[in-house]
Image: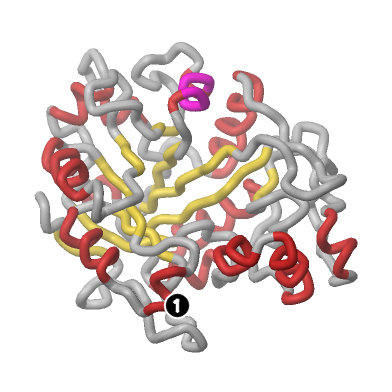
Amino acid sequence: MNDLQAIGTHNSYKIAIPPAELTIIATRSEAAALSLDYSHLPLKDQLDLGMRQLEIDVLYDPDGGRYSRPVLPQLSGVAYDATGMDRPGYKVLHMPDADVRSQCATFVWCLQQVKDWSEAHPNHVPILIMMNAKDGKSTVDGGTDAFDYDAKAFDALDGEIRSVFGPDKLITPDMVRGNHKTLRDGVLAGGWPTLETARGKVFFALDEGPAKVAIYMRGHSSLEGLPVFVNSVSESADHAAYFTMNDPVKQLDRIQAAVRSGFIVRTRADAETIEARTNDLSRFEAALKSGAHYISTDYPTPRLEFSPYKVALPDGAAARANPAR
């Protein structure tokens, strides 16, 4: 499965910010408004288009209701659908109070959509589901701050994943580590499942920095018993298996070296709507050349008011042989 290359989406759940709310954001930062002006189709439709990597931002909400009354919809007067937001469990949105509309408001709801599609297409190549665990202060006056993360919060995240995907559908760190001492040793020994074994399955990666990764690991240096891979701290770490390297131009050599060693890498073809507005394919071309396994975009289809820019594999397939392997 690490001999493939596929396309995916960035903030895959995101629905467009209504114009009235985008205008409010622009009065505070025009650059922010421009960078947030993108959206995606429902997850099922993205998978139908051939996307094989999804990115889901999650926010811990153990009691429910924490994010159900966001500020910007109140200021704009645009109706906000809070269905599911009052129930306990992880929520899915980009920025509390500011960029809040999602194709699936809860993490479990998002995962169930992926599972339903997967079961209807059991021969698909493995789907990477990336997660950002959102925390920090609200960017909006009077807004709601996100919870910080601890072991209990990540226990709950793992529980939600396992509530949807059983062991027969999950590729886990233990599967890759096998009988080796560390996960890294398993990767370097060729421990990723074969493509035929991996078909019809998903795997998860926590896309966070070292501090949050350490909290997620909960003392399991090779992610023993855990369902999620993490953005590896370094190529020499015991848990090294997956890397987020978002700049395929500046990080080209490092990405290629990681891919050739056996690690799985995700990179980005575009960011903040810049490439789409200028029809600039240079970053995407570097991503293809890098051999990164999953290339993320906001434009699996073009936004023609900007340009014809879109991201797809050269033959339009869902996956191809990795050019760096």
- How packed is label 1: few (under 14 Cα within 10 Å), some, or many (20 or more)? some
Horizontal relation, residue 109 to residue 125: left or right: right
User: Considering depth in this image, is 304 or 27 the residue closer to the camera?
Assistant: 27
Question: Which quadrant of the structure image shows residue 62?
Answer: top right
Instruction: Inspect the magenta stretch and tell me whether residue 298 lies in it.
Output: no
Number of marks in picture: 1
At a point 13% along the width and 36% down the height, the residue shown is 261
- Whether residue 136 is visible to the viewer of this picture, yes or no, is yes
| Part of the protein shown in magenta | 211-215
Secondary structure character of the magenta stretch overall: helix
Horizontal relation, residue 118 to residue 193: left or right: right
Instruction: Tell me if residue 207 comes above or below residue 173 in the rendering.
Output: below
Q: Position of residue 182 (x, y in %)?
A: 26, 17
Judging by the rendered image, the residue that carries numbered circle 1 is: 277
Where disc 1 sits, the SS reads helix
Instruction: Inspect the magenta stretch and tell me whether residue 214 lies in it.
Output: yes
At a point 28% along the width and 64% down the height, the residue shown is 283
Instruction: Tell me if residue 169 comes above or below residue 179 in the rendering.
Output: below
Instruction: Tell me if residue 161 comes above or below residue 323 in the rendering.
Output: above
At a point 77% along the width and 52% down the height, the residue shown is 97
Q: Amino acid at mark 1?
A: Arg
Q: Position of residue 265 (x, y in %)?
A: 28, 45
Q: Position of residue 139 (x, y in %)?
A: 72, 47
Instruction: Tell me if residue 242 comes above or below residue 49 in the rendering.
Output: above
- Whether residue 122 is visible to the viewer of this picture, yes or no, is no
Question: Which quadrant of the structure image shows residue 186?
Answer: top left
Q: Position of residue 229 (x, y in %)?
A: 39, 33
* Scheme of colours in the image: secondary structure
Horizontal relation, residue 302 to residue 198: left or right: right
